[in-house]
Image (cartoon, rainbow, N blue to C red):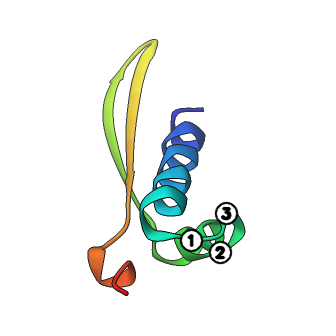
């Protein structure tokens, strides 16, 4: 669930700040997305989703 939330928020950020269409952002992240796993102490899981800036350049 944490991964889904991280990707959802990253897609929203790409839409708002870079003008991506929701589905274009989703497709790009499926190919270029980066996931970093954080805390795994039950039940507080944390995940960070990211993408390299070179893929966001205008």
Disc 2 to disc 3: CB gap under 8 Å: yes
Residue 15 position in % (x across, y down): 54, 61
Helix or strand or loop: what does disc 1 sit on? loop
The extreme right residue here reads 23
Q: Which residue is mark 1?
A: 20
Q: Residue at x 65, y 75 (%)?
A: 24
16 or 26, nearer to the observer: 16
Q: Which residue is mark 2?
A: 24
Q: Which residue is mark 3?
A: 22
Helix or strand or loop: what does disc 3 sit on? helix
Helix or strand or loop: what does disc 2 sit on? helix
Q: Does 54 appear above or below 16?
A: below
Q: Residue at x 42, y 61 (%)?
A: 17
Q: Does 17 appear above or below 19?
A: above
Q: Residue at x 71, y 68 (%)?
A: 23
Around disc 3, counting alpha carbons within 10 Å, would you say few (fewer than 14), some (14 to 19), or many (20 or more)?
some
Q: Does 4 appear above or below 34?
A: above
Around disc 2, counting alpha carbons within 10 Å, would you say few (fewer than 14), some (14 to 19), or many (20 or more)?
few
Q: Is residue 56 left or right of residue 28?
A: left
Alpha carbon separation for disc pair 2 and 3? 6 Å
Disc 1 to disc 2: CB gap under 8 Å: yes
Which quadrant does the C terminus fall into? bottom left
Q: Nearer the viewer, mark 1 or mark 2?
A: 1
| Image quadrant assignment for residue 56 | bottom left
Q: Residue at x 56, y 71 (%)?
A: 20
Disc 1 to disc 3: CB gap under 8 Å: yes
| Image quadrant assignment for residue 30 | bottom right
């Amino acid at each position: 669930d944490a991964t889904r939330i991280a990707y959802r928020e990253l897609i929203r950020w790409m839409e708002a700040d870079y003008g991506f269409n929701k589905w274009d952002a989703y497709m790009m992240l499926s190919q270029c997305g980066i996931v970093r796993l954080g805390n795994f102490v039950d039940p507080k899981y944390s995940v960070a989703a990211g993408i390299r800036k070179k893929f966001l350049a205008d």
